[in-house]
Amino acid sequence: MLEPLYRRFPALLMASRNLTRTKMRSLLASLGIVIGVLAIASLGMFGVALQYSISQNLGGIGNQVTVSPNPDAGVDNLTERDIREIRRVAGPGVTVSPVKQRIEPVAFERGENTSQLVYGLQQPAKVYNASDGRIPEPFQSGALVGSTIAEEYDIQPGTTITVNGTAVRVRAVLASEDSFSVFSPGSSIVVPANSFDQRGYSQVYVTANSGEEANETAMAIRGALNDREERVNVEELGSIVDQVNQTFQVINTVLIGIASISLLVAGISILNVMLMSTVERREEIGVLRAVGYQKRDVLKVMLAEATLLGVVGGLAGVLLSFLAGLAINQQVVNDATAVFRLGNGFYLAAAFTFGVVVSILSGLYPAWKAASEEPVEALRG
Amino acid sequence: MTVVDARGLVKRYRTGGEILEALKGIDFKLEPGEFVSIMGPSGSGKTTLLNILGLLATPTEGRVELNGQDVTNLGDRKRTRLRKQTIGFVFQHFYLLPTLTAVENVEVPRLFDRDPGRTARARDLLTRVGLGDRLDHRPDQLSGGQKQRVAIARSLINDPTIVLADEPTGSLDRDTGRQILDEFQRIADTEDVAIVAVTHDELVNEYVDRTVHLVDGLVGEEALDA
């Protein structure tokens, strides 16, 4: 099976036969490479899976921009004109939801009044989904409650609650989002914006279709409203996602760096094994030189041995890492087939390459030592 | 044409501050097809002479011509190439690679040459030394005499003009030694290969054309023609 390969690379023939001579030793030497490759590749793939699951969870907020008044500039709320301006600069596909908010006494089911943060929105259906009931459109009357509050006070659609002394019917319970969002509806109470008598808005939620669009919108809003002074704070949540991603990148790089140490150790063990075998095979190497092998031929044979150790160990390591990748992805993102993503391939290839390179580097010194031995000295025994 | 013409060979070693003179001025000539033995007590310089003739070492003084070419001061790379083309080696301990079959062992010197006829030639050589039925055996499946025949076949794979043998019968019993010496004689006679055997074994002298006695780095009496 390997005949044609050996014919093409005769050094491989001698190298592979030499390695089978001390099977256990060769096996242990490449086991080091297996472990090193496994450590690097599986940590890399773990990072990829983690990042993927984070971006899945945080994916939504990358599209979100919040605009709030800047109290440092003496702006306490956003005016109708600001809202119009924001709507104007935001693209047609972008949802702009102005929010009023106030702390009001709220009573659930004839209970005591408690102070709750109450939001006023015109079109809550654009921001929230209902888990129970229906969010009316347009939103003229009634109230919506977040799932946390609904659970705590046992509220269903149809229940009556009292907001600031006025009894209102609950129309819907808001679904808590799977993913993290600034507009988290968990403990919100939402009433129609027109039931607030205050004029300005405390915040504007802007939802774009993509992170890129959100970024463009944020820049446009800054340009339009902060022309002369910093009237509003525009927060892009995409940058948070970027920061989280960056942090994970750093952690992952450090972990892989630590894993690389195991490959270095493997390299030292290959160095050791090769040095032993050059000593043991001193006479054989002398014979090779006597029968006309140039130094570089001996070098080739020895380096082929180191390369073989690395390639065999690397392949086994890649195979094991792939299995580990399946398990990791099943655990982290609940989808074993996610192992086929490109990033994983990169880590597998990088770990394999690193393993082989370490082996070859470790083989260099013993190979050089073997090649530069004087045949007369070697044959003297 | 003379195969080897060495004149005034001196070899000095430095061993721990002392200078050891292994060869003290030796002339040595070898004709094609000649079978010569070099005898002498331990430390007489036999192996040193063989190493110089085999281009494994260079003399401190003197001059070596191989097939008319001055090879005294060649660099390692050129010496190695020339050694491969013109010289075959046979050792006392055979020095076969234990992981390779007989055929592969014979091929070893040419392994790095792109030569499609290599294997056929190796098989042919093994058949000629009487190992046609042992081609794919490993050294540990062969007897001492068979191993030495494999080594002889290996020494011939490059069509050398000289075969240098260091104690070729040293690890063999007397009968096996005779078979090996028969083989050498056949090669010298039919293939016109010059053979130099360094030995302690008086048996060798029954086969050689000439014996060179070395004593303390000098050529002693020369017994001509057996």
Image (tube, coloured by chain):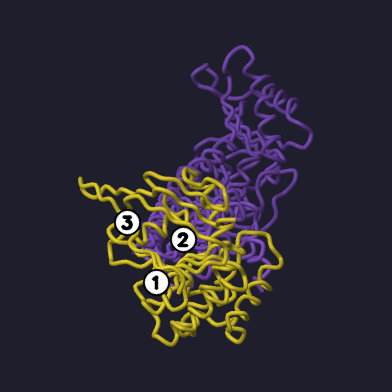
Chain colours: A purple, B yellow
**Which residue: 38% across, 59% down?**
A378
Callout 2: SS? helix
In the image, farthest residue toward the left: B17
Q: Would residue A50 be seen by someone viewing this image from the given angle?
A: no
Which residue was labeled with disc 1?
Answer: B167
* Nearest to viewer (mark 1 / mark 3): 3
Respond whether the residues carrying marks 1 and 3 are from the same subunit: yes
Q: Chain of mark 1?
A: B
Callout 3: SS? strand
Respond whether the residues carrying marks 2 and 1 are from the same subunit: no
Q: Amino acid at mark 2?
A: Ile
Q: CA distance from mark 2 to mark 1?
A: 44 Å
**Which residue: 42% across, 76% down?**
B204
Q: CA distance from mark 1 to mark 3?
A: 20 Å
**Which residue: 67% across, 23% down?**
A82
Which residue was labeled with disc 3?
Answer: B218
Upstream in the sequence, badge 1 or badge 3?
1
